[in-house]
Image (spheres, rainbow, N blue to C red):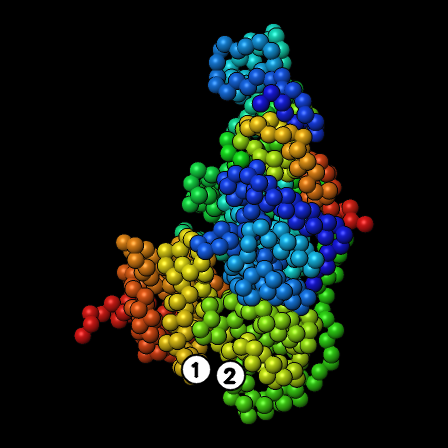
């Protein structure tokens, strides 16, 4: 993974010093609340319902075991001994003290981490596929490009005060696992007819109040032009994005108002001035960054023999077999596999882990995955490059730590925002809904039989829980001061990204869980063999589900 | 404020900001709006004092920029400090139109913006509120290096890494 040199380190260290000074001036009354707000947000510090909350950047979801241990340590020293993994592959501390944040940042800087631009109206952490580098359908490893974008966007002098937040995702594979069409800019690596690798650029995607799938504005952008082109997009947005109404300020609104064609023309015109300028990438830099994402030293493995071994163990241990089914994925390299450690055991808020679990994750990474850890937008942890012959041992080690719940991709692996328990913007709580669903569907055989099912929960229209793209989405709404929930069906974040449709009138919390059960009954009754919930929904349509959920009680 | 930061030093402000359009311009160094400049530039040839313009953050400078490039001062207004359009305008003036006079940030700016403002081409800062300018000028040195190309640094860090 990328390693800082003296330049990167200095910039992060100076940011810590700058923020320390800003905090000091704020506490001394020399900076007003209004002025401090964007300054602290640009450094990841929210003030929420109960306490400040600090969001720490995990660039494109990649961490070393050393960094994971540091987070564990920080959560013990400065917080309550647990942290939360977010849907943007970042980490949140829920209870830091405002006065101590500079010290936390200084600790983070020691392990090449920071909280720069994890919030606020600026360019946020660039995200990508959690299986980058090991996915068999990969065109090119997206992580060097994410790192190049990270450096370009870090403290960009022109774009620190955008109309609204700005998110970029890079997709490097056939299958989209980065939801790049739901970002302000989606960068897709492609190979053109001449065999050259470059990018397709999409703009204006996003969730939130007005969910939109991004529009293509450039069919092929040669590699070296990435940064000058991004500069052009951002400059057009910075100048012309709506600044009067925060609900109309995302780039998607501008793209829609102008039409994608006009937006593309404006960007192209701006780019003509920047193209081939000094920010044009050169082969030396591209190779330098790529040099940090080399493959580990894989051993030559007799894949067949190992597989036989694994199969034998699976036949003996039902739990292991289930875990293999749900939590282990093949990878490009023979004899190795990707393991997802579930952060969704029943009874725990999705994405929450304790300091001890973090230490265990770091240990597991050191032992089995070359010391590297990946965070996912589904709020789990992936260990890639695990020798298949180590899988059984890894499973046994992860189980007592509560990290081996075999529920990845099932209804219990839901995405859930912090909601009304923590978030001051919430209309309704989301964590208790997640818990109630997990409690209701605790029969593993039933859950497996349901197969792949994405259930996403957001506590308000801001959609941090990505409810629009869940096969089943749940949205907290306020109904005369009470917490109600709207159900949506049919969303999906894959290549054929689709936004869910509202099922019908909103429901009380108790009714939500029962309705989910009804929805699943309709699915089970109607599915064809091997058909997933989403496929069945697409075939039979919304009404079949709606009729049953809203049928008068008999 | 009677004083401002210019090229890193505290200096006296000799310019009068004329916020509203008027035919009745005072003598001395004046900073007028673009529309005022357009209406009166020919009458201003004999003005006793220097003339500069101030641009609001939402202006399409492309439409008139050619007429202001010879002025000694262009001010860019920040109606709110979180309105970041002025950063792009300053870069356009310097990078695209090669403006070499003074670019002054006016309006609701805060000291924590000095570093990126300077990178975008501002060299003068007139704060609305009273503050210790010497103390504030420290923010100009918040960072000793940066990744991006900007007005203060023609080469990106990736070409300068040793
Ligand atoms: S979706 Fe709403 S409630 Fe949930 S975290 Fe985001 S802002 Fe808060």
Residue A191 at least partly seen: no
In the rendered image, the quadrant that contains the N terminus of chain B is top right
- Where disc 1 sits, the SS reads helix
Dot 1, how many residues are within 10 Å of its Cα: few (below 14), some (14-19), or many (20+)?
Answer: some
The answer to whether the residues at label 1 and label 2 have Cβ atoms under 8 Å apart is yes
The quarter of the displayed image where residue A427 is located: bottom left
Residue at x 66% of width, y 42% of height = A275
Provide residue A311's location: percent of width, then percent of height. 58, 89
A199 and A246: which is toward the camera: A246
The quarter of the displayed image where residue A455 is located: bottom left
Provide residue B82's location: percent of width, then percent of height. 53, 38
Residue at x 73% of width, y 61% of height = A292
Provide residue A553's location: percent of width, then percent of height. 20, 72
Question: What residue is pinned by disc 1?
Answer: A444
Q: Earlier in the sequence, mark 1 or mark 2?
A: 2
Q: Above or below — where is A307 with respect to B56?
A: below
Question: What residue is pinned by disc 2?
Answer: A322
- Where disc 2 sits, the SS reads helix
What chain is tagged by disc 1? A
B108 and A278: which is toward the camera: B108
**Left or right: residue B47 compared with residue B24:** right
Q: Are marks 1 and 2 on the same chain?
A: yes
The quarter of the displayed image where residue A376 is located: bottom right
Q: How far apart are marks 1 and 2 (CA)?
A: 9 Å
Q: Above or below — where is A197 with respect to B140?
A: below
């Amino acid at each position: 993974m990328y390693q800082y040199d003296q330049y990167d380190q200095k910039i992060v260290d100076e940011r810590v010093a700058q923020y320390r000074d800003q905090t000091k001036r704020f506490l001394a009354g020399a900076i007003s609340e209004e002025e401090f707000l964007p300054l602290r947000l640009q450094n990841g510090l929210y003030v929420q319902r109960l306490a400040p909350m600090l969001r720490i950047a995990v660039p494109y979801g990649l961490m070393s075991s050393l960094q994971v241990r540091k987070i564990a340590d920080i959560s013990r020293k400065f917080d309550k001994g647990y942290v939360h993994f977010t849907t943007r592959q970042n980490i949140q501390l829920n209870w830091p003290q405002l006065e101590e944040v500079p010290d936390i940042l200084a600790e983070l800087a020691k392990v090449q981490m920071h909280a720069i631009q994890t919030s606020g109206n600026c360019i946020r952490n660039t995200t990508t596929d959690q299986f980058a580098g090991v996915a068999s359908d990969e065109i090119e490893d997206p992580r060097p490009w994410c790192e190049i974008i990270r450096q370009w966007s870090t403290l960009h002098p022109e774009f620190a005060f955008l109309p609204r937040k700005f998110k970029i995702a890079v997709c490097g594979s056939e299958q989209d696992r980065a939801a790049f069409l739901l970002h302000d800019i989606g960068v897709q690596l492609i190979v053109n007819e001449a065999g050259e690798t470059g990018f397709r650029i999409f703009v204006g995607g996003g969730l939130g109040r007005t969910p939109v799938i991004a529009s293509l504005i450039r069919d092929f952008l040669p590699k070296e032009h990435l940064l000058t082109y991004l500069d052009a997009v951002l400059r057009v947005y910075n100048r012309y994005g709506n600044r009067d109404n925060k609900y109309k300020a995302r780039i998607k609104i501008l793209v829609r108002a102008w039409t994608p064609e006009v937006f593309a023309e404006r960007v192209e015109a701006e780019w003509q001035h920047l193209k081939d300028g000094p920010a044009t990438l050169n082969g030396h830099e591209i190779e330098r960054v790529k040099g940090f994402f080399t493959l580990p030293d894989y051993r030559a493995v007799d894949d067949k023999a190992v597989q036989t071994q694994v199969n034998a163990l699976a036949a003996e241990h039902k739990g292991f077999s289930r875990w293999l089914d749900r939590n282990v994925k093949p990878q490009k390299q023979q004899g190795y596999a990707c393991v997802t450690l579930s952060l969704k055991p029943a009874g725990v808020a999705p994405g929450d882990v304790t300091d001890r679990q973090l230490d265990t994750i770091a240990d597991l990474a050191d032992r089995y995955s070359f010391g590297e850890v990946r965070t996912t937008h589904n709020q789990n942890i992936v260990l890639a490059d695990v020798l298949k012959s180590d899988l059984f041992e890894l499973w046994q080690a992860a189980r007592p730590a509560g990290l081996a719940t075999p529920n990845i991709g099932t209804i219990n692996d839901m995405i859930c925002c912090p909601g009304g328990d923590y978030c001051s913007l919430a209309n309704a709580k989301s964590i208790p809904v997640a818990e109630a669903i997990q409690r209701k569907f605790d029969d593993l055989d039933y859950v497996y039989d349901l197969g792949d099912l994405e259930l996403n929960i957001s506590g308000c229209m801001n959609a941090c829980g990505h409810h629009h793209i869940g096969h089943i989405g749940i949205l907290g709404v306020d109904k005369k001061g009470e917490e109600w929930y709207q159900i949506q069906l049919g969303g999906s974040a894959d290549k054929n990204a689709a936004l869910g449709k509202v099922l019908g009138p909103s429901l009380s919390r108790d009714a939500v869980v029962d309705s989910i059960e009804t929805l699943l009954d309709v699915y089970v009754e109607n599915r064809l063999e091997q058909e997933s919930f989403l496929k069945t929904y697409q075939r039979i349509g919304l009404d079949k589900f709606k009729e049953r959920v809203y049928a008068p009680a008999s | 404020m009677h004083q401002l930061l210019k090229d890193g030093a505290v200096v006296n402000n000799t310019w009068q900001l004329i916020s509203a359009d008027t035919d009745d311009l005072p003598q001395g160094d004046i900073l007028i709006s673009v529309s005022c400049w357009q209406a009166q530039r020919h009458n201003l040839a004999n003005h006793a004092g220097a003339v500069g313009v101030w641009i609001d953050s939402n202006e399409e400078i492309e439409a008139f920029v050619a007429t202001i490039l010879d002025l000694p001062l262009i001010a860019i207004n920040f109606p709110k400090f979180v309105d970041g359009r002025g950063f792009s305008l300053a870069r356009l003036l310097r990078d695209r139109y090669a403006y070499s006079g003074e670019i002054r940030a006016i309006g609701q700016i805060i000291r924590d913006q000095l570093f990126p403002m300077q990178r975008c081409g501002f060299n003068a800062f007139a704060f609305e509120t009273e503050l210790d300018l010497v103390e504030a000028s420290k923010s100009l040195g918040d960072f000793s290096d940066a990744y991006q190309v900007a007005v203060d640094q023609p080469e990106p860090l990736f070409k300068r890494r040793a």
